Amino acid sequence: MIKNGIGFFRAGVFLIIFLLLSSACNILVAQGTANDTAKVSFWKKDQADASDLYTLITKRSLIRQRDSAKKDVTDSAYKRLGPFYTPMLYPGYQMVTGFFAGFISNVSFYTHRSEDAKISTILINDMYSQYKQLLNIVNSNVWLWNESVNLVGDWRYYQYPTNTFGLGSETTLSDIDPVDYSMIRVYEVALGKIADNFLGGAGINYDYYWNITETKQSPDITTDLDKYGLTKSSVSSGYTLNLQYDDRLNANNPAKGTFIYFQYRDNLTALGSSSNWQSLLLDAREYIRLSKRSGNVLALWSYTWLTLSGSPPYFNLPTTGKDAYNNTARGYVEGRYAGRNLIYAEAEYRFRILRNGFLGGVLFSNASTVSGWPGSTFERINTGNGFGLRIKLNKSSATNLCLDYGFGTGGSRGFAFNLNEVF
């Protein structure tokens, strides 16, 4: 949590400048031909990214994919298959990690050429933080056979000293409870086409937590983790049933469209789970392009995560910041609010700062509530608000570097970092 707002604000400004300059020097793509459009002024391009800034500064062109003749790469009728690489080695700061060093890589590609082809993405994130956290994450969203099959994955390995704050929406920062654990996650879903943009399928969800420890400020304190049931390890293993509607062409940075995802998860001791429990997830997003000329977008997100029956292990409870990309509840540290049930909503306005799209900005507002414990009654609604900067790293995949600063209730505030849009 940020205690010195001015100091961290200056650190954040320095980080933004560093990443802006370093992104210009990254070779973001692999195969291709020399960029003949380097002759066109950086400021007059319809789409500009970090390689164009590199050309502007050095007067030299990177070897990269040939630019599309279309103004809107997302809507281009001609799709180059790629792959489009966006790697970045970077220092950073986030509320849950403190200062960290990381390597993140986005690999995006098309599996066929057509006007309505959807981009596939593999996002790899490895980092080590000042709190001695080691995180290895691979998120994948791959489309096959003319969008008739969609493979969605979330694979992780953590060594993770962090904090919890108890259960319910009325906890305060003074309820901080330092914990430590190691974790392996394997989530994989295979979806098949039912109708246009509508798919259904099944998957596996496996979470293994071990070496779980709690460091109390006083041994006389009884925390919510103690009351709920502190164990040295836990396993959640089961199958999922899934339905999805997705007419977005580029999930990296949607210009328009609708995404609705439904998942029923059933964890069974017969499949190795520590206990039997069931949950339901409903993720719905809408993207409204306000102007084709400006490219400005109003993005709406609702995220509902419910425990249907049984008692999930503490670290599998619905929690803010624990969605697939750890993006809910900007303005709060990851894991700030937890309970048996979570309801979340967010709106974000995305706009260009530069005409060529190299720099953009966002304004966002979110609200969340979790149920108290014991019981399942929803408590107080906690809101978050903030703003952010967008830097176009790769126009072929519409990949942005996202730097956000959010404010929450009770003095909560801090930075958030992403490659690709938050949702």
Image (spheres, rainbow, N blue to C red):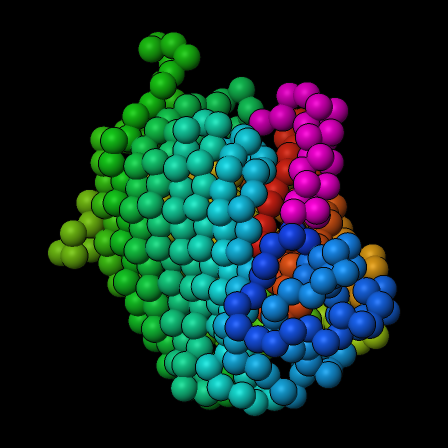
Quarter of the picture holding the C terminus: bottom right
| On screen, residue 174 above or below 132 | above
Q: Using residue 360 as the reference point, say whether residue 413 is left or right of it.
A: left
> Residue 77's x, y, as percent?
65, 88
Q: Using residue 200 as the reference point, say whether residue 120 is left or right of it.
A: right
Of residues 61 and 108, the one nearer the viewer is: 61
Residue at left 75%, top 75%? 37
Quarter of the picture holding the N terminus: top right
The magenta stretch spans which residues? 1-22
Residue at left 60%, top 54%? 26
Residue at left 72%, top 41%? 17
> Residue 80's x, y, as percent?
57, 81
Query: Hey, which quadrant is residue 18 in on the image?
Result: top right
* Magenta-span inclusion, residue 355: no
Of residues 170 and 52, the one nearer the viewer is: 52
Can residue 174 be seen in the rendering of this structure? yes
Query: Hey, which quadrant is residue 241 in on the image?
Result: bottom left
Residue at left 19%, top 45%? 274
